[in-house]
Image (spheres, rainbow, N blue to C red):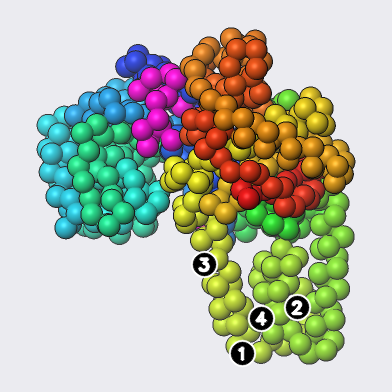
Amino acid sequence: MGIFTAKDLKNSFFDFFKSQGHQEIPSASLIPENDPSALFISAGMHSLTPYLLGQLHPLGKRLVNIQKCLRTGDITEVGDAFHHTFFEMLGNWSLGDYDYRQMIPWNFQFLTKNLKISPDNLHITCFAGDNSAPKDTSVASLWQSLGIDPSHVHFLPKKDNWWGPVGQSGPCGPDSEMFVDTKPQDPVIDFVSGCRQGRFVEIWNSVFMSYFKKPDGSFQKVDLPNIDTGMGVERTVATLNGLSDNYLSPIFLPLVKKIENISGRSYQQTENQAAIRVVVDHLRSAVFVVSDGVEPGNKEAGYVLRRLIRRAIVRAKDLGIDSNFIEQFASAVIDNQDNYAGDYPELSQNRQQIIDILAKEEDVFRHTLNRGLRQIDKLIENEELSGLNAFTLYQSYGFPLELIKEEINKRNYQLKPDFDDQFEKAKQGHVKLSRTLSAGKFKSGLADNSEIITKYHTATHLLHSALRQILGDHVSQVGSNITAERLRFDFTHPDKLTDVQIKQVEKLVNSQISAAIPITCENLPLDKAKKQGALAFFSAKYPKMVSVYTVGQDNKIFSAEICTGPHAQNTADLSPLKITKQESAGSGKRRLYAVFG
């Protein structure tokens, strides 16, 4: 078999599941809509949460997609052969339709027939069982009946083979993970240790959401289970090409060569590999994050973006890149026809904006980088260069420890014996915090479908329409964030709102609330929904069938938006809305905070 590309995998996956009656849906934005519990979409299921909780999808019960994802909990691990921050996740979904008895034969067929992986090289994990659910022997038996060697089926505990729920209660269940043995000629002594050492590579996971966790902590079997699968494109493509280094796959190799060309350093030289991997991974991620409307900043998603860019620039310095280069690299990502250009039109649509934002941040940080070097000089001069201060440099300027030590060595300064311990202690505290932010606590947001969250989400529709009527049709939603205490709404507008404008918006919203207007939902073809005037601003792409939520009836429609929900049934269910704060949300964007009074 020749080179297996990302397009080969995507096309094969979509063709297979479409032939099984699945409808393709587009990737959601990397930025979760109306969910404050996470900064980024980190899995395919995230954007489909309302449907996993029972809401009907306009395209039916069988879905297939590829989802952009970003995970930063292990950002410090990037630099090895297989860790990434941004990645693509293929998935298929059953919303109360089929169960594991249909899914596992499809798993086996796609892996062995379509991807031509030998059954002898497959290893499977199943749930080992505990006091909440029994051992998943039925799933294991089905795998074995299809041709998987019984010794290749491994039972693991809940931490390895159970998914969910996303909140304190909700759909959840056991899963079955599929691994490829990269050294099938060697005896299997310990499967778990082999996974940690990279011998067994997980490429697919099928989650059987056959339970519902109640608020009291007990688990109840459900009548109509959901299925959620996930296949990481980057890891799978590398595995199918027989590569132990993901950065040598057709996905990353063009970007690696771009950095080689810019730096004059070879990836074949071991001392250059970690730096090139970090630069390639972080800047690829940054391109996609900016494309979805985020700008570098000091809070939340903007802070993560800034950190990615700065870490890349620092590691580029290790490669001898001392002048601006990000524009060249960003263009290589955007123009990559084999991987992204066709799948994500938002890249080319936002091309100049992406390049301008990244180039500006690079300019700013190169000055910051020089200030950081001067700070090292100052700390050395005052004999204050402790491990704790070094971590402050790492945190403030994006300097990794090796760069700090390198600069210190250049200055012939002798470090104190506890330097590394102090630095590591401070770093571990920060990593713990970063992982908490990345994973999210799911205490609120649409993940819980609570009554107050539903009401605030409905209020964003009223606020959106009111802003357009008061400020003009140039206003469009670019993000929102909802908790049980307030809503936050981001929109396009160049100027700060005056006190008079804020009062006008409040008055218009509250007039709709007091008028007790019904809110209806209708599933329509996308073209028809847009033709009827439904707003569709938040996501870059929509499926061919969409849900339109309308406030009003006949010729008295106040708001009509394409949205996934959930929503109140009548504006009378809402309390009067009060705008409490406004601020900038980036260039040409404003942000409003509001509460129910």
The label number, if any, that marks residue 408 in the structure image = 2
Image coords of residue 40 (percent x, y) = 57, 46
The label number, if any, that marks residue 417 in the structure image = 1
**Given the image, on which type of amino acid does mark 3 rest?**
Lys
Image coords of residue 371 (percent x, y) = 86, 68
- Is residue 88 one of those drawn in magenta? no
In the visual, does 453 lie left or right of 349? left
Image coords of residue 92 (percent x, y) = 38, 28
**Given the image, on which type of amino acid does mark 1 rest?**
Pro
* Circle nearer the viewer, 4 or 2: 4
In the visual, does 537 lie left or right of 542? right
Disc 4 marks which residue? 388
The segment highlighted magenta reads 50-73
Q: Which sits in the foreground, 308 or 166? A: 166
Lower position in the chain sequence, tag 2 or tag 3: 2
Separation of disc 4 and disc 3 at Cα?
Answer: 17 Å
**Given the image, on which type of amino acid does mark 4 rest?**
Leu
Q: Identify which residue is drawn at 65% across, 12% down.
A: 555
**Given the image, on which type of amino acid does mark 2 rest?**
Ile
Q: Which sits in the foreground, 58 or 406? A: 58
Please tell me whether mark 1 sits on a helix, a strand or a loop. Answer: loop
Separation of disc 1 and disc 3 at Cα?
Answer: 25 Å
Q: Which sits in the foreground, 234 or 275? A: 234
Disc 3 marks which residue? 432
The label number, if any, that marks residue 373 in the structure image = none
